[in-house]
Image: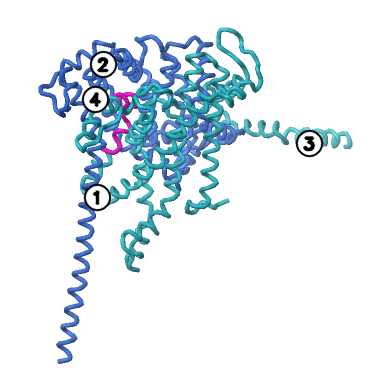
Amino acid sequence: MATSTVESKRKTTTTRNQRLGRSRQQRKRIGDLIAFSLLTLGGIAMLLPFLWMVFTSFKSTAEIYSYPPKLLPREFLWSNYIDAWTLLPFNLFLRNSATVSICVVLGQLFTCSLAGYSFSRLRFPGRDRFFFLYLATMMIPFAVIMIPLYVQMRWMGWVDTLWPMIVPAIFAPWGTFMMRQFMSTLPRELEDAARIDGASFFRIYRAIILPLTKPALATLGIFTFLGSWNDFLWPLIIISSLNLKTIPLGMQAFQSRMPLKTPWELVMAAATFAILPILIAFILGQKYYVQGIVTSGIKGGG
Amino acid sequence: MSQGSVETQLDRATQRKRQSGFGGEIRRAFSGLQGEETRAGYLFILPNLLGFMVFSLFPIVFALYITFTEWNLSKPPAFVGFANFITLWNDPLFWKTFFNTAYYTFVAVPTGVFIAFWLAILMNRKMPGIIFFRTIYFLPQITLTVAAAIVWSWLYQPEFGLFNYLLGLVGIDGPNWLSSTRWAMPAIIIMGNWQGMGFAMLIMLAGLQGVPNELYEAAEIDGANSWQSLRYITVPLMTPTIFFVVVTSLIGAFQGFDQFQIMTQGGPAKSTTTLVMYIYQNGFSFFKMGYGSALAFALFVTILIITFVQWQLANRWVYGFQQD
């Protein structure tokens, strides 16, 4: 009699644990379901402007002003894109943006990695004081610099050219800061071995440090590219001729040219292919961009 | 013998003089094996340093100088001392733009961080499709602000825009959004949050993943439900991350320009003109370089104060902040 009660008690205990385990699993599944649906709702909200932009770009003018607004166009007017492209010289805008951004990225990658290596690895008097200077200027908002920088550009005769958007950006302190931070995490043993073998510092930089910093270089490249491509205020100050405008300026010109009877479908078409290059660049370099943000966040937050 | 020792004593004295002080430091730096390192060091930073000095350092000093002048670029600058700052203090438009900027900053950032926090919590699960979600939520961040602003202008269009249509479906008569002095700024706040949330969310997500799992397990053993573990473990340990996001977002939001310029051009009735826009107008529409610089410094000082206050407050609520 006693043994059977003990056995039956043991049986009930096991099933209770199983029940608890199952209910915890169930709770997690329900939680996942709720999270998933909320995220999907939010995701739709996030994507809605993009979807609306793309669909509007294919509509005809009559459809745009129809009420209630329909999501999908009746037929896909690819001609809108051609019209938008020819209304303003978008090929020039694209060329300008690409020129500026690529030059800035290449320039930054080169000078900042070199300087970053020097700041993190080489010893020379005043090194830390100089670096502190870099750090201090990073805190200054752009609005403070933009007026004197404009005057300087005037002195150099660079107003209304592409130079002001390339040269100052190459020397932005942020890139050097990032490179230096990353390089100081690299192990010293490789360099010491190379030094003992008599390698020059440049050789060490080129053959050892550079290959190891590829992820940081990729991150810096992506950040710089996006920042340069999206820059609006500074080009607005510098550029006045239509042919030298970059894509953000071109978009604004588009919008401001036709205030009253805005052909929204053309504007949306322009917006779509303004966004396209960065979208592609982002999808390709997504890993590095995300990593870059995360590491800076952890460093700053932790 | 004594002559030789005097000479050697003199030599030793000059030698010691050469070795000491800054001159000695420089000499040591450039000699021998260290010399090669020093030369390489300077050489490598030279391009970067020169460019930095010309395009980052000099402008700052120059800006300070311009602040004390009145200059419209067609005549040489006239020194006016603190006159620009006095004008600034008495300028109602300055205070209006200051208020606008503060309104935007102190509404957009808390709401954005709040939403981003919850988004990050939702995303911090082992579920299929997380990367997909993360990309979607981050997409607005990398979009051209100008393009996004244009699209949102269209969405906010009172008669044909999507938003008023959707509001109409639930029986609400949507306002004139960007043409209304009351709703223009909230409209831009919503757009700004849509765009800026990806950044905050990503950092929060990383912060969440830094919270050690053992704490959650220990709490579960002690019988805590998920709400309690959220409140007593997650939130306190996330405070450093939240702090970082808040501070960087505040600094960024206070300098907002692009979307305001595109969506409303600062109207209606200057209700959406931000400080940076006002600086831009003064500097490049009216060519009042001195006043513009003074405004810019006011902006800088404000940001410093905000950051400083945040830093001080952090001692109270950020976990592990009391280090010094």
- Which chain letter matches label 1? A
In this rendering, does residue B235 appear at all? yes
> According to the rendering, which colour does chain B have?
cyan
Which residue position is annotated with label 3?
B12
Considering the image in quadrants, where does the N terminus of chain B appear?
A: top right
Q: Residue type at mark 3: give it.
A: Arg
Q: Is residue A42 above or below residue B71?
A: below
In this rendering, does residue A105 appear at all? no
Q: CA gap, disc 4 to disc 3?
A: 91 Å
Which residue position is annotated with label 1?
A35
Q: Nearer the viewer, residue B187 or A38?
A: B187
Q: CA gap, disc 3 to disc 1?
A: 79 Å
Residue B88, x across and y down, in percent: 57, 24
Q: Secondary structure at mark 2?
A: loop
Mark 3 Cα within 10 Å, few/some/many (few <14, many 20+)? few
> According to the rendering, which colour does chain A have?
blue
Which residue position is annotated with label 4?
B159
Kindly report which numbered mark, 2 or 1, lies closer to the viewer in this rendering. 2
Q: Residue type at mark 1: give it.
A: Ala
Mark 1 Cα within 10 Å, few/some/many (few <14, many 20+)? some
Q: Secondary structure at mark 1?
A: helix
Q: Is residue B211 above or below residue B162?
A: below
- Which chain letter matches label 2? A
Kindly report which numbered mark, 4 or 2, lies closer to the viewer in this rendering. 4
Please tell me in which quadrant of the rendered image residue A296 appears: top left
Residue A110, x across and y down, in percent: 43, 26
